Image (cartoon, rainbow, N blue to C red):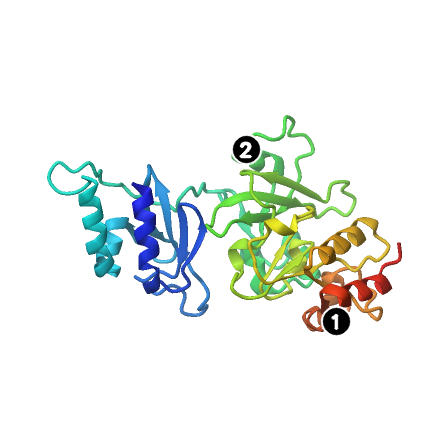
Amino acid sequence: MSTVDQDYIQRASYRLDKFKKVKNGLYNFRCPYCGDSQKHKNKARGYFFMIKQRMVYKCHNCGIGRTCANFLKEIAPEVYSEYQLEKYRQGRTGKGSTVEEVVLPDSKPRFTNRTKDLKKISDLNNEHPAKQYLLNRQIPEEQLGRFYYVDRFKRWVNSQKQTFDSLQNDRPRIIIPLIGEDGVWFGIQGRSMDPTSTLRYITVMFEDRLKLFGQDNVNSEETVYVTEGPFDSSFITNAVAMCGSDVDHSTLPYRDRVWVFDNEPRNRQIVQRIDAAIRSKEKVVIWPRSVTCKDINDMVLQGLDPSAIIKSNTFSGLEAQLKFTDWKKV
């Protein structure tokens, strides 16, 4: 049944602003009922997803839910007529119908309430250590709501997924959520605020997905900048972060992307990553010699404008190879 639903959802896509197929059984676009965000024209929080082999609609902005049939009837009546005829051919409508009524969930699809017992950094007072930590790093205030705080990291993680056998030395951490385009928290990074900690970052995955921060916050139709760390990405418009992982270029879903590696020409691993990106014909940033800061956050702390530097130092092909050869020191 879902094959028919998906076929007719795509036929109705001409009526759906910012429509895109995220993957088989998952479609995203701006909600035609509420109009979605009025401030951000690229925000798209309407989703078709599969429940019990049926496609159903849910808007994460206004909360409206519809079966596929009712959605098509209200939004694309000309497509709905064809949809009903197709179901009739398959014996799935009319008297004796095999179509069951789909009960929509009250919450978002597959959205476990990961934020329970977490506090948004933006909601904390300015004297709170976690908020102080990010403000001292000059993370933009409008970005603070993307990060969370928890008093007892191990206990909270175990409430989501059994991970730690012992709760000894359970300390506070900043939670960096890994959220997919479908809004699902598929993993997290816990960032220690203790400068003496031997484990600055602890990554816990809830689902097997590409380990990228910021997938829920970018417009894939525009240039996407791929930074190394989540905090670095908060300074760049339309950016995701690799979260310390070695991302395969071929797995990234963004057609137009620029790789922004750290400025560490003596770091063999980073040098190898840049070399691999250039060989794969990717666009990369090669930092100029005048910039000595090791990453984007450090540049901001030194009063530099990383966005301007990135735009004027993005290269590909032979030019990238020449710039890279001059930049590296290993």
Q: Position of residue 120 (x, y in %)?
A: 54, 52
10 Å crowding of disc 1: few (<14), some (14-19), many (20+): some
Picture quadrant of residue 19: bottom left
Q: From what the image shows, is residue 74 above or below residue 197?
A: below
Judged left or right of residue 180, residue 281 is right
Q: Are marks 2 and 1 in contact (CB under 8 Å)?
A: no
Q: From what the image shows, is residue 302 above or below residue 56?
A: below
The dot on residue 161 is 2
Kind of element beneath mark 2: loop
Looking at the rendering, in which quadrant would you find the C terminus? Answer: bottom right
- Residue at screen point 54% across, 60% down: 218
Of all residues, the one furthest to the right in this rendering is: 329
Give the number of marks. Answer: 2
The dot on residue 5 is none
Picture quadrant of residue 143: bottom right
Looking at the rendering, in which quadrant would you find the N terminus? Answer: top left
Work out whether mark 2 precedes mark 1 in sequence or the reverse, and give the earlier one.
Answer: 2
The dot on residue 304 is 1
Is residue 17 visible to us here?
yes
Q: Position of residue 202 (x, y in %)?
A: 67, 41
Three-letter code, disc 1? Leu
- Residue at screen point 22% across, 47% down: 86
Picture quadrant of residue 77: bottom left
**Cα distance, mark 2 to mark 1?**
41 Å
Q: Nearer the viewer, residue 190 or 292?
A: 292
Q: Nearer the viewer, residue 6 or 212?
A: 6
Kind of element beneath mark 1: loop
Three-letter code, disc 2? Lys
Q: Position of residue 24 (x, y in %)?
A: 43, 46
